[in-house]
Amino acid sequence: MIVFCNHLFAQWQLSLTLKNNESIAGISAPTNKVIWCVSQNFFIYKTNNAGKDWSRIKCNGLTTNISILQLFAVDAATAFLSVDKNTGVGPGIVYKTIDSGHNWLPVFTHKGTCNILISMFDAEQGLLACSFDSFNGSIPAGENLYSTYNSGNTWMIDSAVTPKSFILDLEAKSHKAAFIDYNNFYYSSNRSGTFPLRYSIPHPSDPKSYLQFEDSNYVIFNSSSLIDIIVRRPASNGWIDMHTPQEVVAGAVTAIVLDGNECWMSEAFDTNQLYYSSDSAKTFTPTVPIQNSSFQFLTKARTGKTLVGGTPSFTNGQIWLNKRQATTANNISVTSERFPAVEQ
């Protein structure tokens, strides 16, 4: 059964269609009001009023021949963009803007083909994970976790923990931080001052992605290039391997969002379904948030409740919002609002 209503929450609403057939490369939402998007051709789309109006901003200062790895927005003015130069030997670069995306300056670089992940506790302190190798072996493979205490202007290797293999995902929230490599889940409750908890995780040879957590006892991530959901819940006494959960069509996960006992999981390439759980990821219900498309990108406002969905990177990008206000279960989940003005 596919459900066309979003249970007790407000409707998904179309907020933005990118101009000139541009496609999405990343989304970040610091608050309910402030939402950033970067396109594959290096334009920033940004709203400061919860999607009522969007600005389109050309990124100045980026080098050429790069692929976007991650966009992480701190607030309405400040964001980080991690990229990798398409040479087979890197380097990986992190750029920072403090003028709403107009101008970008490099604040971190590392040799090799890099996967760089960023997550900030607040405007000043945060973490950066860099895993690297090279196509010809000229740069030995490795990984490091870095910290910043000056708003990301400089980064130093974090001495609190030594990862055992490539860092595959990273998240910081409030005073808590967690990351996963192929073998372990690492957790800190004191802003990465120490990482006293390290749990072995299943399937050490499989890729890991879409890490979400509430604390060290409530964690979810995907452990496959397709679907293999791993969950740790309070009183579960370890990891639960859900494989492909019941009611979920076999395919590839493209995003997971966790918020208390609620969980959303998208599957953009094999179906147009968004799966919803209200029981701490024990069971999932398939929903169709938008017709004839899906969400490759899905995130929640870090200090709010709004969900932000982005259509696949091979299509003309659209941003959809769900502000999750209480409504009746009979309301249909899809509404198309008047297309908002986009400033050049």
Image: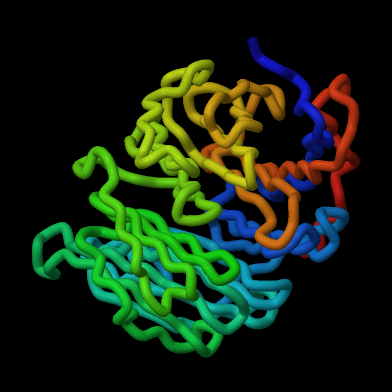
Image location of residue 341, percent across then percent down:
86, 54
The answer to which quarter of the image holds residue 281 is: top right
User: Between residues 310 and 104, which one lies in front from this camera angle?
Assistant: 310
State how the image is colored. rainbow
Q: Which image quarter is the C terminus in?
A: bottom right
- The residue depicted at 40 percent of the width and 62 percent of the height is 187
User: Residue 73 in the image: x percent, y percent?
Assistant: 62, 68
Single out the residue that lies furthest toward the top. 1
Measured as percent of width and height from the top left, residue 282 is found at: 53, 28
307 to the left or right of 195: right
Tell me if residue 36 can be seen.
no
Taking the view exactly as shown, the residue that stands out farthest to the left is 137
Residue name at image x 34 percent, y 54 percent = 185
**Residue at figure coordinates x 43%, y 67% from the top left:** 188
Task: Write the residue at 70% across / 46% down.
Answer: 307
Q: Is residue 102 shown left or right of residue 31? A: left
Residue 95 vs residue 156: left or right? right
- In the rendered view, tell whether residue 302 sits above or below residue 250: below
Which of the 4 image quarters holds residue 284? top right
Q: Quadrant of residue 250?
A: top left
